[in-house]
Image (cartoon, rainbow, N blue to C red):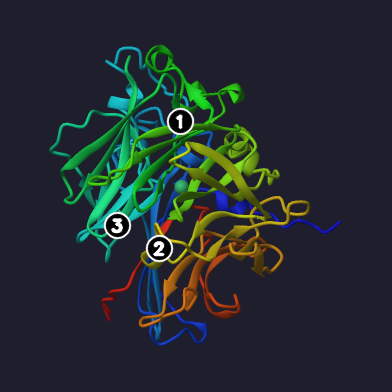
Amino acid sequence: MTRQASYSSGYRDADETDVVSLTWDGHPPEWLEGSLFRNGPGRYDRGRVEVSHWFDGLAMLHGFHLSPKGVQYHSRFVRSHDFRVSEQEGTIASPGFACDPCRSIFRKVASAFLVDATDNPNVSLVKQGDRFLALTELPIPMMFDPETLRSRGPVVYNDSLPPGSTTAHPHQDGKALYNQVLHYSGLTSYRLYTQENLKERQEFARIKVKEASYVHSFGLSEDYVILTCCPFQVAPLKLLVRNKPFIHNFEWKPRHGTRFHLAPRPGKKAKQLTLNTEPFFCFHHVNSFQQNGKLYVDLICYPDADIIHQLSLERLRNDRAIDFGKLRRYEIDPQEETIKRLWESAHCIELTRFHYTRCNTRPYRFLYGVSADENESVFYDRIKKLDVSNDSALTWYQPGNFPGEPIFVARPGSTEEDDGVLLSVVLNGEKETSFLLVLNAHDLREIARVNLPVAVPHGFHGLFHREFKDTE
Ligand code: CO
């Protein structure tokens, strides 16, 4: 039995780090200039209250400004309303994902979660126009300055979409950003929208449901938005009257199966339809594309929603083992209105990235993600490159290290899908510090790394932006 290194030092409360200049160990490619931004929870202790789930830590942004000379690293908490209340009053401002609200939410009209919910944007990052945004599952993105990481205030929409929950995984296709708002009411519906400027969203389809599913992401193909509703559900009225943290209202209802809702994108002649299949749970869609009249939908699947319980802070801080996701492909025939599971990968994978600008909504071959040995690992402890054409994989693995989402950066002028590098922030479980790792995306060989003076808390998603301003 191999000794399992501890991953739990990535779940301690972190402090902000002022800009530090660090040197490369190895030789990154000359073209690798720009900024990597990461988002994720950075603090769980809120004074008198300690939140209980990974997803409820206060948002912390990490900036890595890369040049051939070296890397400048810094980190900063997002100055959300939640952050200020935590700092000033030593408590939580609003019910988050799984933390107990410390005041009654009954008195709020509709649901406190929806109207007066957490604005702690700790999940992902997106660049919209020239704005950098930190996102969570509430439609209150926080703008931030890419050079200083300082918060620039929330986005206030000037449109008629109702309040609700959203996803922190909008799709981008050309100028348009796609996302949805789940509006809970007696007539609960997912409102699909596109957005071409920061403040206005245009609804183009509505999917009505009796029970709302927890939806973390969705798929986009040439003609469709694919909204996958796993049977982890809540009857909307229960959400309105129960005084429970958001996610504790949801129940696993496998008898309902999983519903794939297909809605045509604006200007497409396809029809809206719903297909039912086996129950599974999923956070992340990967890619979707159409070929020879069929629609292929790739997602990272779990047998049920127990993974949410497994990601509680109490378990993670005690190095407990978690379940690992697997890539699964569904084949949909929109004409025949049929769906079937085409295959499931033999490899565990999560927090995946691919060559998005080239392959989003199109057939693709390579997928990169954090991975694990199903039998030996307790946490994601390696990086894999999956060839989805034959389910073969390459692995980067150094025992005792715990990598985060590997972001693919294409070489400028590249023609091959995997010509570029992967950037991943890795926690060294023994040293209890992190490093930024640069791998060759073609063969997963290490090209360079930069050791950081701190442990970067385990986070979720990030963004690479090519423009680099050397402040020296
Ligand atoms: Co996510």
Q: CA distance from mark 2 to mark 3?
A: 10 Å
User: Residue at 40% across / 59% down in the picture?
Assistant: 360
Determine crowd level at label 2: few under 14, some 14-19, many 20+ residues with C-alpha closer than 10 A. some
Q: Quadrant of the C terminus?
A: bottom left
Dot 3: what SS?
strand
Q: Is residue 352 above or below residue 194?
A: below
| Residue that sits furthest to the right in the current view | 1
Q: Are marks 3 and 1 in contact (CB under 8 Å)?
A: no
Judging depth in this view, the residue of 308 and 177 nearest the camera is: 177
Q: Please give the residue where the numbered disc 2 appears in the rendered image.
A: 356
Q: Position of residue 324 (x, y in %)?
A: 65, 47
Q: Amino acid at mark 3?
A: Asp
Q: Position of residue 310 (x, y in %)?
A: 63, 37
The tag earlier along the polypeptide, 2 or 3, is 3
Q: Amino acid at mark 2?
A: Tyr
Judging depth in this view, the residue of 205 and 339 nearest the camera is: 339
Q: Please give the residue where the numbered disc 3 appears in the rendered image.
A: 173
Q: CA distance from mark 2 to mark 1?
A: 43 Å
Q: Is residue 368 left or right of residue 65?
A: right
